[in-house]
Amino acid sequence: MSDDRSEPVVDLAYIGRALQRLTSDVGSLREDMSALTAIVLRHDREFERLNTKLDDMLQQLRAMVAQHQRTAERVRQLEERG
């Protein structure tokens, strides 16, 4: 049997460097997540504002259609008289 080691030697310095890399990666992921969350929240607020504007426009359009229908009915009645 040979005295050769097939497993790598891991010392505390290696573990420390690996832990620092892991800590740095987690910090980077947190920063990315914060930025993405801010973007999503901004888009959500913009969507809500747009949705409110669309609702307002739909209400205005319905009122204009009703107004047009009333005018068209009055014109029809006048044409029937004449």
Image (cartoon, rainbow, N blue to C red):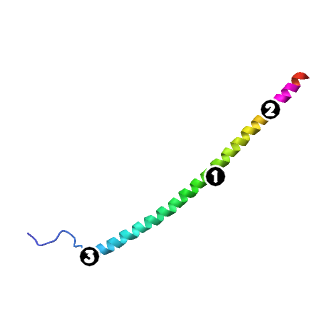
- How many angstroms separate mark 2 from mark 1 (CA)? 32 Å
Q: Position of residue 10 (x, y in %)?
A: 24, 73
Residue 12 in magenta? no
Residue 76 in magenta? yes
Where disc 1 sits, the SS reads: helix
Q: Position of residue 15 (x, y in %)?
A: 29, 73
Where 78 falls versus 56 (above or below)? above
On the image, numbered disc 2 is attached to which residue?
70
Q: Identity of the amino acid at label 1? A: Arg
Rendered image quadrant of residue 27? bottom left
Q: Is residue 65 left or right of residue 47?
A: right
- How many angstroms separate mark 2 from mark 3 (CA)? 86 Å
Residue drawn at the location 85% of the way across and 25% of the way down = 77
Give the main secondary structure of the magenta stretch. Answer: helix
Q: Is residue 36 left or right of residue 18?
A: right
Where 11 falls versus 64 (above or below)? below
In this rendering, which labeled residue sits more in front, label 2 or label 3?
A: 2
Magenta region: 71-78
On the image, numbered disc 1 is attached to which residue?
49
Residue drawn at the location 36% of the way across and 71% of the way down = 21
- Give the mark nearer the N terminus: 2 vs 1: 1
Residue drawn at the location 33% of the way across and 74% of the way down = 17
Q: Identity of the amino acid at label 3? A: Leu
Rendered image quadrant of residue 75? top right
- How many angstroms separate mark 3 from mark 1 (CA)? 55 Å
Q: Identity of the amino acid at label 2? A: Arg
Where disc 2 sits, the SS reads: helix
Where disc 3 sits, the SS reads: helix
Residue drawn at the location 70% of the way across and 44% of the way down = 57
On the image, numbered disc 3 is attached to which residue?
12
- Give the mark nearer the N terminus: 2 vs 3: 3
Where 2 falls versus 55 (above or below)? below
